[in-house]
């Protein structure tokens, strides 16, 4: 028996897509599992990166024992520099995961002081009240682990991201035995990946991509260009193997592709036969039917290598008629338009483009489908279940799926969104007090360029109907307006259309000032607000538009 | 023999998704096929509707003999009011298509003067040099036609949108016989729908949805809510039939759902058994297991009925735990996020949500897949082939597919984008002179609120980094600045962050003015531009942001 309380505190990734981060707290000990980022959508005007708000951890800085990483995808490690900049805790992860983290830390000049500790599957690590065993799982990136976290209250299993691949290309199977052993002994709480709960059946093995890739090698009469995630080492290995078989040289193209393949090669995770590698700058000098270019930028990111190749603006690769370009990655929801635009450009250059909707696709998911999620639930047999990594619809489905299994012992499932917490003690499990969480928006790669919500709101407002600025010069001696008010606007209406409306708007401003009391006129804040309200009413009526209106008073 | 020239002039929908419109010209006669609209994406800041630029038709107003509509989807008829407002030509279409057009024209007060003419499959119509036969085709909306257009140079077949449904729910088969007869006699040019060229095999029959819909009726313990396109009359008929079978009453919810079902019912196209219809306002008073609500707003449009239901802001329908909500429509690329957000809200209210990725989906496409496109090509056996309705990647694939068929007689395929033209005469076919085309962006439902490109560009600029406005008061007598320049900004940086930067920016403005010659200072345009350039350099260097900079000079 224990009178302690375990708190499960999702900082990100529950009820939202990406930026996964979870804290566990037991008394004075806190551990953090993953610190991911999210790529913002168009609704976050001009923002480049979004991370969770780590202020809960900052406030409890003295208690945080360490950051444990399950694997090296951006939505699990992309926030590490931002967290470490606030709180330089020790970091634990597999060699490959940490190598990717190192690269990020170096970009932010944080590598030197960082305390990175390599762990391996099967090893144990004690952080305060938590004893963590690392369990190898299969996923679309190498060296992924699930966590079995022993606490005084019982064992918590965190799956990380996973699929149950029965035939992984590196023959490193999901360590179901260890998971089963924990299940047999009894598990308090399971936290399991919900990404593909919508999909019935099993996710295909990574090996299922081999014949589809081979088809590309067989059928491409000329240059073969494949774009995939640079971290998909299994996929890259298959491409390299096929290139050797079919007598093509391999050129890795793109900054992240070059960096990641170098890391994977150094760690012995990517085997590259001698003499097969081609420098990007030699691509166009090699016979087209003797090369395969593996290019980063699957999501149509504007500055990525693949996007630049598509608009023929890449220094080492040009598409020529008859080349084949294949997308070997999923289309992340929200990126469809950008990816299709890229494919249109490639088709305009005469390439045969192979992508998403074509069947069978040159891609399989790295996340387990419904049957794999059921398998893990049945092996682990937890008392409590909390679905993680997904939007609300997916978490709810995963909870429903667990309830339908009705295996003896499942006492309750919980659907939490980031910031909602779960408390477990000897009496059972229940929702706890929420903690403040949120999104931190960052404009570019640096640490301090945080974009305030207010600024984003303004940008959204500006993007819809532009702005209208009435400018009134007021004589500082007399307190009276000097001359007529000026009105400037952009993004509102074209000059011709708006001239009449804005002319009348000037009269409205004058009328508002004239109709104000001397007292009101003395208080610029009041007069600005009155002008704003009157102008807004007038413009909405005349134009049905709602520009941002910001009266400016200039003292002259 | 003829010394005439046939011009094929795509005004929209080739190389872009939506706003399909095509003109054919022979000497002094022009006919227009379809006048669609496009729903803009987030990149078109705040714009509500996009139509093709019809100025080519306006310039040739005296020659336009009529507008022929293939079917009633928005991407084929949504631009009709905007075209007719410029050019009141007679309009031809099936009864259902014209009924939908009437509704649009009424909204724009254009119905009275419009000249609408109902046509039927099998009928012929002569417009100038063009003799048009209407051929029934199957698609996801009722009363669709393809066009066989006989010209002095030969026959042009325009498929409209189609699938080859072997078992349509209304038993009205695609009239392959007529198509075959034209093919046998010889066809000059085929224009064929490319939407689903990416998909191998055959598109499933609309009837394939029946068992999936039935599954919903069988398994839903409580209220069943289905969202589908209001124009999918076949789909609605299947839902009504199942409702009758399973003893549920049907409530149509949403403005367009109510309007379209009324039109379809009046025309005898939607059969509604007596006593089965429920008024939306009676929904919540009926036992939940005795109703099905059919709701418009499949794409998560913010003002649609389904979106309002999702946030519990609809006057007649509230979701309660245990209700089932199914999406019976495709997810149009670009709308994923909005649709998933809607589904998340519904799941939060306790609904079991059924949508896109689930297998088998409660939806089939209305467009033919690769094998159907091959069938039509083989039946029609055209001399020339021009793929229509698709982005470049799809048009290119469709052209490739036709070339691989290598049936005797196919002389050439062409991939054109809107504005590029095709010329055919006795010598053959070739690309002609391009004509000016483009997009007309409209801010709301009215005819005259066209948004200029310039305004959209400004909005995009504003949306990324906001604006910075230096304001300088200049004494009209002395020509000298009065007091310090003021700088206002929004959407740029937060107040605290920017105060230092903007303080220094004021000094830059002063310096720029001081360093200018008297002549420059006399020309406000010059001085504004100098200030803009200097400020831009400074702000980019200091903040890496590129706000819209617009110096204002105020004469006092």
Image (tube, coloured by chain):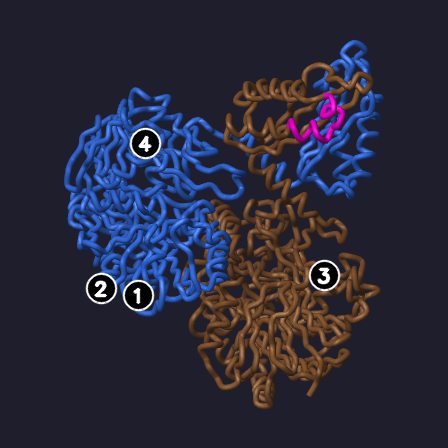
Chain colours: A blue, B brown
- Residue sitting nearer the eye, A225 or A104: A225
Question: What's the CA distance linking mark 1 and mark 2?
Answer: 9 Å
Which type of secondary structure does the marked residue at label 2 adopt?
helix
- Give the x, y percent position of residue B268: 68, 74
Name the residue located 32 percent from the left edge and 62 percent from the top edge: A287
Question: What's the CA distance linking mark 4 and mark 3?
Answer: 55 Å
Chain on which label 4 sits: A
Q: Can you identify the residue that label 2 sits on? A: A245
**Label 2 near label 1: C-beta < 8 Å?**
yes
**Label 3 near label 4: C-beta < 8 Å?**
no
Question: What's the CA distance linking mark 3 and mark 2?
Answer: 55 Å
Q: Can you identify the residue that label 1 sits on? A: A217
- Give the x, y percent position of residue B426: 65, 83
Q: What residue span does the magenta drawing correspond to?
A: B518-531
Predominant SS along the magenta part: helix
The total of numbered circles placed on residues is 4
């Amino acid at each position: 028996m224990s009178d302690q309380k375990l708190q499960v505190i999702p900082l990100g990734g529950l009820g939202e897509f990406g930026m996964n981060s979870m804290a566990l707290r037991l008394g004075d000990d806190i551990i953090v599992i993953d610190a991911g980022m999210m790529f913002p959508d168009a609704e976050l005007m001009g923002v480049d990166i979004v991370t969770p708000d780590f202020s809960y951890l900052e406030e409890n800085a003295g208690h945080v024992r360490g950051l444990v990483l399950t694997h090296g995808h951006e939505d699990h490690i992309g926030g590490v520099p931002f967290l470490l900049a606030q709180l330089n805790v020790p970091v634990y992860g597999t060699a490959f995961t940490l190598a990717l983290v190192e690269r990020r830390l170096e970009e932010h000049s944080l590598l030197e002081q960082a305390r990175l500790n390599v762990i391996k599957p099967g090893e144990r690590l004690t952080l305060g009240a938590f004893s963590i065993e690392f369990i190898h799982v299969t996923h679309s990136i190498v060296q992924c682990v699930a966590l079995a976290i022993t606490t005084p209250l019982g064992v918590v299993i965190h799956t990380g991201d996973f699929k149950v691949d029965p035939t992984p290309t590196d023959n490193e199977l999901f360590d179901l035995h260890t998971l089963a052993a924990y299940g047999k002994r009894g598990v308090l709480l399971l936290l399991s990946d919900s990404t593909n709960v919508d999909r019935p059946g099993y996710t295909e093995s990574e090996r299922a991509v081999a014949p589809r890739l081979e088809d590309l090698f067989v059928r491409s009469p000329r240059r073969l260009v494949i774009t995939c995630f640079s971290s998909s080492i299994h996929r890259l290995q298959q491409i390299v193997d096929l290139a050797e078989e079919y007598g093509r040289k391999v050129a890795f193209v793109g900054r992240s592709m070059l960096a990641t393949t170098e890391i994977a090669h150094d760690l012995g995770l990517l085997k590259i036969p001698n003499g097969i590698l081609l420098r990007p700058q030699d691509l166009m000098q090699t016979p087209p039917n003797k090369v395969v270019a593996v290019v980063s930028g699957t999501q149509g990111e504007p500055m990525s290598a693949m996007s630049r190749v598509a608009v023929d603006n890449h220094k080492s690769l040009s598409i020529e008629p008859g080349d084949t370009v294949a997308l070997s990655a999923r289309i992340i929801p929200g990126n469809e338009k950008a990816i299709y635009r890229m494919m249109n450009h490639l088709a305009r250059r005469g390439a045969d483009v192979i992508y998403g909707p074509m069947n069978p696709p040159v891609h399989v998911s790295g996340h387990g489908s419904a049957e794999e999620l059921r398998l893990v639930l049945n092996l682990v047999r937890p008392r409590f279940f909390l679905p993680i990594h997904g939007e609300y619809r997916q978490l709810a489905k995963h909870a429903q799926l667990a309830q339908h299994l009705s295996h003896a012992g499942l006492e309750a499932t919980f659907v939490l969104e980031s910031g909602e917490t779960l408390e477990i003690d000897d009496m059972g499990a229940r929702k706890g007090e929420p903690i403040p969480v949120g999104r931190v928006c960052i404009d570019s790669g640096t640490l301090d360029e945080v974009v305030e919500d207010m600024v984003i709101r303004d940008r959204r407002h500006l993007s819809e109907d532009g702005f209208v600025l009435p400018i009134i010069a007021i004589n500082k001696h007399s307190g009276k307006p000097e001359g007529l008010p000026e009105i400037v606007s952009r993004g509102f209406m074209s000059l011709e259309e708006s001239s009449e409306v804005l002319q009348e708007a000037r009269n409205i401003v004058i009328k508002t000032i004239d109709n104000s009391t001397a007292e009101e006129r003395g208080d610029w804040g009041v007069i600005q607000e009155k002008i704003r309200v009157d102008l807004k009413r007038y413009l909405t009526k005349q134009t049905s538009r709602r520009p941002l209106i910001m009266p400016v008073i200039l003292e002259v």
